[in-house]
């Protein structure tokens, strides 16, 4: 038995399948609940989760925001905080009602009243949690940990009661009022929308654009005003026209008709060609004020005393139209404001709004009665044309707001609403916002800041049914108003027991008047906008102030929230308004605003267009970790848009996870080899080793520096800087540390050095697993489950571990600097080799490193052995004086970068850059920039070209990264060419080994037959080749009969032929019993240390073995049961031909995978012993697939006796 069982890591990994195993494991250990129990009593890190609707499935936007939240909250747990993570559901409002309206074909309020609010709300309640189970599955599969059992829903009576309390506080502060206001209105949903809702869904549309004449009453020239509109349906409600007092207007005559018009002078030619008009007079707009005109339609002629006159306001611009704006005050915000200020209308008058809740005309507009306003446009235009009032007609493509839920055009319409006063508190809002920290900060300062500066009173009521009712009871005359703030208060006032707060449960409740003889008070019909409910969630989720008062005070304001950038006008805004009004401060401290995820073509993701892959399909292919890392490591975390590309997720596997996994597997493989070869256990204990190797010191220092960086940047919520550094670190680990230390990790430097290197790699991987755990929780857990078996720890999950503080004693900035410089030199050299197409196999004579800093040169020399190996050069020379080699610099502009920036000035700057001297360029390199021809030019905006007067350009190639300069001698001598050829031969041998499915421990001999230069190199470099391949390398004519063929191949190399033959020396006994070789191809053994070859007998005691018994033998030997058994012709082994296969090889291959079978010899893979006892002959297999002989003398005697007994029973 080995002194320690080392867990074996599979050669290949299906990341998605491994994640499914981890999810199962997490359920078994109840990992999330355990984390919360472990952190109970620790300092709180409070987090608010914005509530989504469960009436639709989660999309990439939800997955992105959820991943950001999960990363931050996991990291906060790692920092030693208790992080409560409750999921919330938005259950009320348009998203739910719209689905019911569609399903039941409900067209408007009348249909709902016929059905009954109780039945309508019952239907809404049924679908509220339609996809809740799917949400839980998808969010869990993405790896997000959040509490669904202890969730909050906006339909809970406790939540609704807290919303009432919030509203009453605002009411008591005098911040609530009822008023008529022109608002964005959804005719499909029969309700107004708040100004931030209307900004969520703009689309480009084509609308009619009409120019209409308004004849001026009593004008001496018989002129008409010309108004222009893209909403012809508002013309029947026209009350005034408006011009800009300061702009220049003109009275002109249309030549072709003789008609006279007035409009803005600068806009005449947008309608009339130059030859068709003649200006008669010009004047400022203020001279038009007070003129009376005849309206385009007579429906409101009774308002002529105040209406149908010209007003002045500076919202009229010269950018579009005629400079004369038609005003229908109850269909436009500016129209309403201007007419109100001018006394044309009053706040309490009957609105001039002949459009019902569904957007259809009503009396007195009888000509278009019953028509939907947008559909009426054509008839209105036709009537204007018939009456001679239509002067010009065209179409305009412009951006227009659509309802965010029904995706139908909004109209602007005056509606009575309940408002929260916001305009008076813009300074307080800005102050509260300034005390918060946003990532990225420009969203707070610009987008959100601008919105706050222009904040308007918030319409919080909706003329709907499924929502939290507004708790205002009012008398019929309006002289008594009560605002209710709790269930207890309503029960006391009504004498009724209340268990639910929806409309069907409280609309019938009346409150007796305190005025004797007055009728009772009834509730107003409106419900709250669902944004008011979500903005109240910090209080309502805890049923504050009715419960959990102390707990609320501990976690308010939240330490962290995160949602999409579109919530700057939504949830972020409503949270801030309510909290500032109630408590004078923001309800959160830190916020991440993410950008939008678009389809790969830059269009909005659309189910209808099917222009994006299903998220679960992506997870099934690549795993959730890959999707998480792709999203977090993208511009979308900086509030920019991301074009989602599935290849990007795939690249995370290829570029990050597979290299990381391979480094991890390489560690475990070599730990296993160390334990077996040294017969001593391997355990990692922090601080138990002190490396002296500079690369060990470097990677440990680099790891601790990374840990310090991660802590600092995560403290600033800079996910977009952390992930690139983590992934870059994995690149450094695999492509620098592991690759440059492979031989040490395999034991070539001795036992102690090997163990130190393995412990170093173990510590680094353990740290990176901890750092990556919040970002890629599945793969980190998978690796930890292996690593923990080599540690003395009781932690069942990596997510139970805290993130360690950096060990400053391991940080050595001098070593980090030296290695970084070494890497620069090596990378510059590799570029030159690639440029000259000289493979790394071929040695080169010399590399010269040039740098003016002696410390830089010292750093390079301290690591010159690594440069020798990595660049395969014979000599390294250094100098601080590049003039010694006659090297000077010449500069050329980067035309692409500078062309875009400088445009027409590029020509002058180009000449100045090209004229820079060597000294000036060196100064520019040192400073990082130079002012050239009056322009600041950064070093990154120029290309540096090296010239040399004293070195041969055919011999040396020059390269620089604007810091260090190297010269690489690219003229190898013949010995170097020959060594490169020898390495080519080695490469061919190793490929042949792999083709034969040989492992490094297989003992082989290599024979060759070659012609020309290849034969000469093979002979002269035979010892070099043998030392590298760790096998004999001899001419083919020395092959003996005992050298049994494994595989051979003939190929061309440098125009010469090369035949390679791999053999295994045999001096073996052939079994007297029937037998077969067993070889694994494409599957990995669980037993026998990963061996791939074994031997099995086809008869025991003269009794033939069945196919099922042979399969059992395969399982006992290798631990493999789900497999196919193939003959060397590729056909599957069957019962009938099993006994005919004696002396052949049977291949064990995967069930559902095409596998290429190798060529094999027909000699037994294992040693055997043939015996004859009591006239019975038989065979014993002496060694297992790993080559271990484990039968004692007594074992052999017992087996032989058993064999003889069975043989005699068969006879």
Image: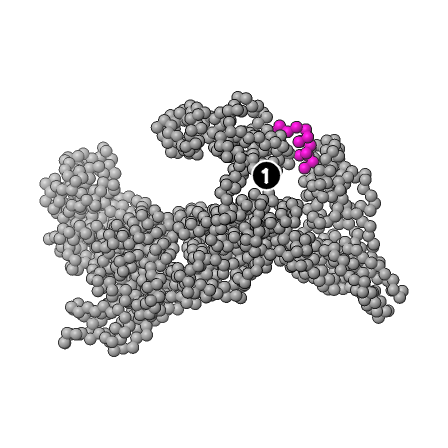
Kindly tell me whether residue 945 is visible in this rendering: yes
Q: Which residues are magenta?
A: 970-984
Please tell me whether residue 983 belongs to the stretch shown in magenta.
Answer: yes
Q: Secondary structure at mark 1?
A: helix
Q: Is residue 85 left or right of residue 250?
A: right
Please tell me whether residue 346 belongs to the stretch shown in magenta.
Answer: no
**Residue depicted at 68% across the width and 53% down the height:** 678
Kindly tell me whether residue 133 is visible in this rendering: no
The C terminus - image quarter: bottom right
The vertical placement of 34 against 206, above or below, is: below
Q: Which residue is mark 1?
A: 866
**Residue depicted at 26% across the width and 61% down the height:** 582
Q: Position of residue 51 (x, y in %)?
A: 37, 61
The N terminus - image quarter: bottom right
Q: Is residue 135 left or right of residue 255?
A: right
Mark 1 Cα within 10 Å, few/some/many (few <14, many 20+)?
Answer: some
Q: Which quarter of the figure has residue 841?
A: top right
Front residue of 398 and 246: 246
Q: Which quarter of the figure has residue 98?
A: bottom left
Front residue of 5 and 832: 5
Q: Position of residue 323 (x, y in %)?
A: 21, 42
The vertical placement of 224 against 14, above or below, is: above
**Residue depicted at 57% across the width and 53% down the height:** 688
Q: Position of residue 301 (x, y in %)?
A: 14, 54
Coloration of the structure image: one colour
Extreme residue toward the top, this view: 949
Extreme residue toward the right, this view: 1175
């Amino acid at each position: 038995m080995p002194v320690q069982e080392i867990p074996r890591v599979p050669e290949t990994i299906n990341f998605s399948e491994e994640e499914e195993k981890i999810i199962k494991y997490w359920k078994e250990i109840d990992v999330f609940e355990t984390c919360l129990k472990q952190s109970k009593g620790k300092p709180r890190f409070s987090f608010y989760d914005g509530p989504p609707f469960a009436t639709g499935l989660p999309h990439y936007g939800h997955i992105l925001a959820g991943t950001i939240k999960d990363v931050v909250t996991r990291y906060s747990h790692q920092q030693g905080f208790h992080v409560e993570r409750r999921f919330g559901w938005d259950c009320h409002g348009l998203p739910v009602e719209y689905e019911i309206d569609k399903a039941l074909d409900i067209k408007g309020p009348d249909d709902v009243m016929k059905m009954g609010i109780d039945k309508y709300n019952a239907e809404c309640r049924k679908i509220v949690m339609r996809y809740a189970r799917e949400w839980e599955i998808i969010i869990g599969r993405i790896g997000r940990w959040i509490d669904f059992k202890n969730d909050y829903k906006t339909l809970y009576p406790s939540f609704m009661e807290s919303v009432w309390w919030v509203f009453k506080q605002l009411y008591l502060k005098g911040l609530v009022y009822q008023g008529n206001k022109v608002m964005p209105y959804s005719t499909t949903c029969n309700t107004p929308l708040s100004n931030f809702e209307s900004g969520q869904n703009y689309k480009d549309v084509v609308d009619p654009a009409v120019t209409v004449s308004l004849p001026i009453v009593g004008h001496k020239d018989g002129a008409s005003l010309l108004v222009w509109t893209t909403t012809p349906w508002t013309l029947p409600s026209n009350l005034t026209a408006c011009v800009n007092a300061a702009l220049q207007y003109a009275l002109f005559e249309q030549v072709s008709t003789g008609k006279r018009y007035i409009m803005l002078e600068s806009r005449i030619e947008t309608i009339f060609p130059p030859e068709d008009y003649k200006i008669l007079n010009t004047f400022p707009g203020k001279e038009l004020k007070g003129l009376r005109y005849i309206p385009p339609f007579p429906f409101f002629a009774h308002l002529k005393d105040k209406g149908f006159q010209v007003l002045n306001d500076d919202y009229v611009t010269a950018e579009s139209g005629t400079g004369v704006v038609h005003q229908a005050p109850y269909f436009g915000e500016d129209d309403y404001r201007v007419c109100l200020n001018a006394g044309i209308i009053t706040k309490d008058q009957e609105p001039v709004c002949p459009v019902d809740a569904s957007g259809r005309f009503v009396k007195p507009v009888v000509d278009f009665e019953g028509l939907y306003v947008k559909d009426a446009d054509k008839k209105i235009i036709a009537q204007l044309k018939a009456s001679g009032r239509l002067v010009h007609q065209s179409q305009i493509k412009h951006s227009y707001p659509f309802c965010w839920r029904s995706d139908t055009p909004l109209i602007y319409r005056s509606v009575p609403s309940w408002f929260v006063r916001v305009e008076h508190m813009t300074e307080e809002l800005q102050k509260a916002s300034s005390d918060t920290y946003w990532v990225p900060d420009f969203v707070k300062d610009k987008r959100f800041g601008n919105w706050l500066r222009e904040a308007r009173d918030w319409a919080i009521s909706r003329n709907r049914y499924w929502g939290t009712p507004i708790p205002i009871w009012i008398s019929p005359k309006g002289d008594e108003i009560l605002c209710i703030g709790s269930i207890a208060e309503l029960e006391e006032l009504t004498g009724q027991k209340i268990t639910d707060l929806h409309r069907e449960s409280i609309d019938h409740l009346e409150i007796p008047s305190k005025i004797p003889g007055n009728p009772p008070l009834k509730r107003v019909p409106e419900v709250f906008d669902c944004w008011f409910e979500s903005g109240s969630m910090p209080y309502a989720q805890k049923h504050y102030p009715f419960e959990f008062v102390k707990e609320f005070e501990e976690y308010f304001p939240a330490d962290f929230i995160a949602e999409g950038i579109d919530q700057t006008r939504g949830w972020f805004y409503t949270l801030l308004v309510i909290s500032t009004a109630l408590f004078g401060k923001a309800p959160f401290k830190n916020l991440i605003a993410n950008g939008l995820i678009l389809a790969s073509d830059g269009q909005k993701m659309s189910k209808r267009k099917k222009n994006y892959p299903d998220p679960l399909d992506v997870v099934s292919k690549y795993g959730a970790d890959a999707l998480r890392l792709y999203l977090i490591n993208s511009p979308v975390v900086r509030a920019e848009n991301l074009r989602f590309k599935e290849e990007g997720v795939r690249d995370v596997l290829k570029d990050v996870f597979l290299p990381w996994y391979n480094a991890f597997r390489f560690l475990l493989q070599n730990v296993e080899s160390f334990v077996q070869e040294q017969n001593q256990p391997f355990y990692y204990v922090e601080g138990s080793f002190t490396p002296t190797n500079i690369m060990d010191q470097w990677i440990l220092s680099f790891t601790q520096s990374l840990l310090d960086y991660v802590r600092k940047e995560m403290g600033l919520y800079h996910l977009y800087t952390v992930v690139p550094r983590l992934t870059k670190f994995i690149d450094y680990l695999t492509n620098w540390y592991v690759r440059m230390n492979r031989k040490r990790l395999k034991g070539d430097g001795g036992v102690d050095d090997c163990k130190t290197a393995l412990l170093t790699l173990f510590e680094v991987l353990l740290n990176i697993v901890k750092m990556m755990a919040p970002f890629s929780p599945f793969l980190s857990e998978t690796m930890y489950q292996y690593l923990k078996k080599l540690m003395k720890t009781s932690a069942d999950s990596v997510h139970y571990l805290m993130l360690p503080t950096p060990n400053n004693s391991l940080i050595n900035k001098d070593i980090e600097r030296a290695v970084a410089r070494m890497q620069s030199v090596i990378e510059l050299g590799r570029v030159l080799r690639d440029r000259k197409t000289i493979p790394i196999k071929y040695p080169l004579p010399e590399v010269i490193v040039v740098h003016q800093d002696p410390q830089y040169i010292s750093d390079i020399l301290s690591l010159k052995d690594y440069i020798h190996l990595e660049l395969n050069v014979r000599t390294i020379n250094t100098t601080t004086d590049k003039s010694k080699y006659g090297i000077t610099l010449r500069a050329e502009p980067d035309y692409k970068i500078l062309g875009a920036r400088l445009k027409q000035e590029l020509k002058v700057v180009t000449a100045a850059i090209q004229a820079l001297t060597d000294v000036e360029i060196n100064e520019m390199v040192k400073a990082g920039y130079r002012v050239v021809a009056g322009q600041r030019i950064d070093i990154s905006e120029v290309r540096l070209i090296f010239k040399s007067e004293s070195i041969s350009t055919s011999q040396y190639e020059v390269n620089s990264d604007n810091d260090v300069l190297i010269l690489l001698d690219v003229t190898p001598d013949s010995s170097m060419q020959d060594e490169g050829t020898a390495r080519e031969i080695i490469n061919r041998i190793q490929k042949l080994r792999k083709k034969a499915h040989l492992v490094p421990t297989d003992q082989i001999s290599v024979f060759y037959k070659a012609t020309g230069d290849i034969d000469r190199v093979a002979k002269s470099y035979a010892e070099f080749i043998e030392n590298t391949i760790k096998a004999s390398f001899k001419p083919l004519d020395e092959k003996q009969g005992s050298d049994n063929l494994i595989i051979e191949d003939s190929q061309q190399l440098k125009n010469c032929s090369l035949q390679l033959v791999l053999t295994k020396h045999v001096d073996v006994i052939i079994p007297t019993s029937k037998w077969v070789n067993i070889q694994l191809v494409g599957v990995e053994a669980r037993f026998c240390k990963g061996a791939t070859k074994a031997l099995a007998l086809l008869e025991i005691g003269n009794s033939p073995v069945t196919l099922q018994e042979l399969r059992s033998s395969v399982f006992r030997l290798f631990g493999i049961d789900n497999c196919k058994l193939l003959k060397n012709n590729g056909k599957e082994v069957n019962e009938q031909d099993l006994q005919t296969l004696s002396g052949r090889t049977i291949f064990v291959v995967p069930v559902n995978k095409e596998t290429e079978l190798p060529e094999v010899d027909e000699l037994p893979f294992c040693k055997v012993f043939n015996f004859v006892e009591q006239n019975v002959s038989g065979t014993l297999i002496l060694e297992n697939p790993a080559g271990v002989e484990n039968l004692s003398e007594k074992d052999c005697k017992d087996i032989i006796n058993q064999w003889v007994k069975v043989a005699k029973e068969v006879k």
